[in-house]
Image (cartoon, grey):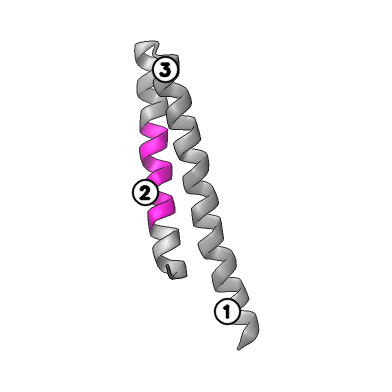
Amino acid sequence: MNSDKHKVEGTNREIKGSANEVAGKLTGDRSQEMKGKLQENAGEMQRKLGEKTDDRDRNRS
């Protein structure tokens, strides 16, 4: 998977996670809230992986 794909998919996962977290808070569903939080964190990690891959590739040039 290339760095751009990591960044895009990670950002999408962050957005979906944030939406799930808010929905969980609004409905009082702690399970959905926590699932959203985990999804958001996983997306952030994936996005940062893409950013670090870009940094590494730039330093090699």
- Position of residue 46 relative to residue 16, above or below, is below
Tell which circle, 1 or 3, labels the residue nearer the N-terminal end. Answer: 3
**Badge count:** 3
Which mark, by number, is residue 46?
none
> Which residue appears at 59% of the width and 65% of the height?
52
Q: Are marks 1 and 3 in contact (CB under 8 Å)?
A: no
Which mark, by number, is residue 25?
3
Task: Give, as a three-letter code, the residue at label 2.
Answer: Asn
Q: Predominant secondary structure in magenta?
A: helix
Residue under label 1, please give it: 57
Give, as a single range, the part of the protein colored magenta. Answer: 9-19
Q: Is residue 8 left or right of residue 48?
A: left
| Residue 10: % across, % down | 44, 52
Task: Give, as a three-letter code, the residue at label 1.
Answer: Asp
Which mark, by number, is residue 12?
2
- Position of residue 10 relative to residue 31, above or below, is below
